Structures are given as C-alpha cells and as structure tokens.
Amino acid sequence: MKNAVLLIFLREPILGKVKTRLAADIGDEAALNVYNELLTHTLTVARSVPWIRQLWYSDQPTRTSVEWELFEIHEQEGDDLGARMSHAFARAFDEGRGPAVLIGTDCPGLRAEHLHQAMDALGTCDVVIGPASDGGYYLIGLREPQPELFEGIAWSTSTVLEDTIRICDTLQLHTKRLTTLGDVDVKDDLHLLRS
C-alpha cells in the first residue's frame, strides 16, 4: 500500500474558532486547550503510520510548523462538510493515491490500530467506517471515489452514520464497521479525554 493516504481534517487552533459548541459551556480558552490536546493526540497517531499523510485545513493555514515536514498541507474546498470530504478523497484518487482513510481531530480514543484495521479492510471492502457514539463517524475510508456517500447528509446530527450506511447499502458497497468510539463535541464528552 505504498500509495495509501491518510486525510486529516482540522482547523487551526485559534481562540474562539475551535470547539465552539464546547466553548459555549466551558469558555473559549478551555475549549482551545481541549482542541490542542485532541490535535496533538491525532497528529501523534498519524505520525505512527507509514502512509502519505495530508492535513486538510478548514481555512488557509497561517502558522508554520515542523509538523509540515511530515504532512502535505491542503485547504478544504466545498460548501459543506460532505462536499469538502468528497473533494479531499477525489483529489487523493486523482493524484493516483489510494486507498484513502479520512479522520478528524475529535476522537481521543483513536489509536494507530484503528487506522491499520481500516486500511487493511480496504484491501477487500469498498468502504470502512469507524462509528462514533453520537451517531456520526470518526473515520471513513474508501478504496475508490464514492461521491454519493457525501450527498444529502444532515451533517452534525445523530443520523450521519445511519444515512451513510443506507447509501452504502443502496449502492451495494461492501462495507466494514470498526469499533465504536466517542467524540469530544460538548461538555458531557470531556470524560473521554481522561478515559
């Protein structure tokens, strides 16, 4: 899998711009600290896998970092999360890369073994999904482009996983689910950081 690629969706860690739902309960500074902890964890896990690693920023990144020596840097494009994810996958495959696995930075339980399980599954499956306990997913992997998986989804709702699986079934895609993990989005999720 020399062309396998890990796509990481993230935001720059800027006060007031990250973890806004969480910040409503704990304040901007505390939310930024949580985001930085999650981001550090995610990048540590990402550095441990041998694939091409891409950081996909929600806005044009302004910081310079030694991390950039280990990751390709891109800016997300699209009107909603689905369009942005579809674009990132399409670009990876257009560049002759794949299979591809996409993650965010909200999952403190993510380990390298989850990424390896996902990439291994794409040897025989069309789609691999890491379900999140809130009804979304913390990981999605594709063996080839599947733009339909990112259309007509009500993002940031409890039906994201269910809707995505329904589309997979409709398209008759061979799909594998990984272990369910929790995301940190709101105050009630903070216990996951210490688990």
Image (spheres, rainbow, N blue to C red):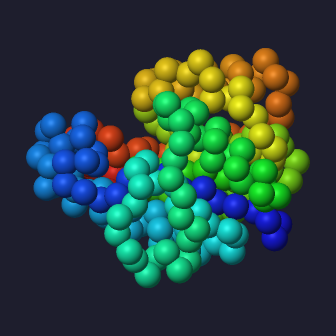
Residue 62 percent location from the top left of the image: 35, 64
Residue 181 percent location from the top left of the image: 49, 46
Q: Nearer the viewer, residue 191 or 183?
A: 183
In the depicted structure, whether residue 158 falls above or below residue 53: above
Is any part of residue 4 visible from this angle? yes
For the point 43% across and 24% down, which residue is it? 157
For the point 43% across and 44% down, which residue is it? 182
In the depicted structure, whether residue 145 falls above or below residue 56: above
Q: Quadrant of residue 145?
A: top right
Q: Left or right: where does residue 35 sit relative to residue 136?
A: left
Quadrant of the image containing the C terminus:
bottom left
For the point 25% across and 36% down, which residue is it? 21
In the depicted structure, whether residue 156 falls above or below residue 86: above
Q: Left or right: where does residue 137 sit relative to residue 107?
A: right
Q: Nearer the viewer, residue 168 or 180?
A: 168
So how many labels did they put on this image? 0
Is any part of residue 105 visible from this angle? no
Residue 160 percent location from the top left of the image: 53, 26
Residue 132 percent location from the top left of the image: 50, 39
For the point 42% across and 55% down, which residue is it? 60
In the depicted structure, whether residue 29 falls above or below residue 130: below
Q: Left or right: where does residue 91 sit relative to residue 23?
A: right
Give the residue furthest to the right: 124
Q: Nearer the viewer, residue 21 or 86?
A: 86
Q: Left or right: where does residue 6 sit relative to residue 27?
A: right
Quadrant of the image containing the N terminus:
bottom right
